[in-house]
């Protein structure tokens, strides 16, 4: 099992930036992919971005591509989500998750961090 702890959320104004962090522990991660998701009140959880620990290949939800950037620091076992030009509709709880086999199934989840964007 992988333990994931997110941080970096907060209250910002529209147009601001935030960087979320997700520290992973508990296993080796060489075969893993990591993802960021979010869930707004009354809405379903949605995928945002994905990165492989090995090689660093990335994939984004179309609506955030160009505004959000996922990255990782293998030495720190940390994945980041840089979010720029934030909008009120980005308000949600943001989660990181681990895909142990890189097959698109996320088995481990963090507790989430709240991001609130005021207009």
Image: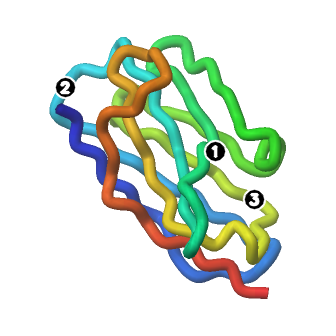
In this picture, residue 56 sits left or right of residue 109 = right
- Label 2: element kind: loop
Q: Quadrant of the C terminus?
A: bottom right
**What residue do we see at 32% from left, 59% from top?**
111
- Estimate the x, y position of residue 64 in percent, counting from the top left: 77, 48
Circle 1/circle 3 CB separation < 8 Å: no
Characterize the local packing of mark 3: few (<14), some (14-19) or many (20 or more) Cα atoms within 10 angstroms: some
Characterize the local packing of mark 1: few (<14), some (14-19) or many (20 or more) Cα atoms within 10 angstroms: many
**What residue do we see at 39% from left, 61% from top?**
112
Circle 2/circle 3 CB separation < 8 Å: no
Choose the circle earlier in sequence order: 2 or 3: 2
Question: Is 25 above or below relative to 33?
Answer: below
The answer for how far apart the CA atoms under marks 2 and 3 are is 31 Å
Question: Is 101 above or below relative to 89?
Answer: above
Nearest-to-viewer mark from 2 and 1: 1
Choose the circle earlier in sequence order: 1 or 3: 1
Mark linked to residue 84:
3
Where is mark 2, residue-wise? 27
Where is mark 1, residue-wise? 48
- Estimate the x, y position of residue 44 in percent, counting from the top left: 57, 58
- Label 1: element kind: strand
């Amino acid at each position: 099992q992988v333990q994931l702890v997110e941080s970096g959320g907060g209250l910002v104004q529209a147009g601001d930036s935030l960087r979320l962090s997700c520290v992973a522990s508990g296993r080796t991660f060489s075969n893993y992919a990591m993802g960021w998701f979010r869930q707004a009140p009354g809405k379903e959880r949605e995928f945002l971005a994905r990165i492989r620990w090995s090689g660093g290949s990335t994939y984004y939800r179309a609506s955030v591509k160009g505004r959000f950037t996922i990255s990782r620091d293998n030495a720190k076992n940390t994945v980041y989500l840089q979010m720029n030009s934030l909008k009120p509709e980005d308000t949600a709880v943001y989660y990181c998750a681990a895909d142990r086999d890189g097959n698109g199934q996320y088995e481990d989840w963090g507790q989430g961090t709240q991001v609130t964007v005021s207009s």
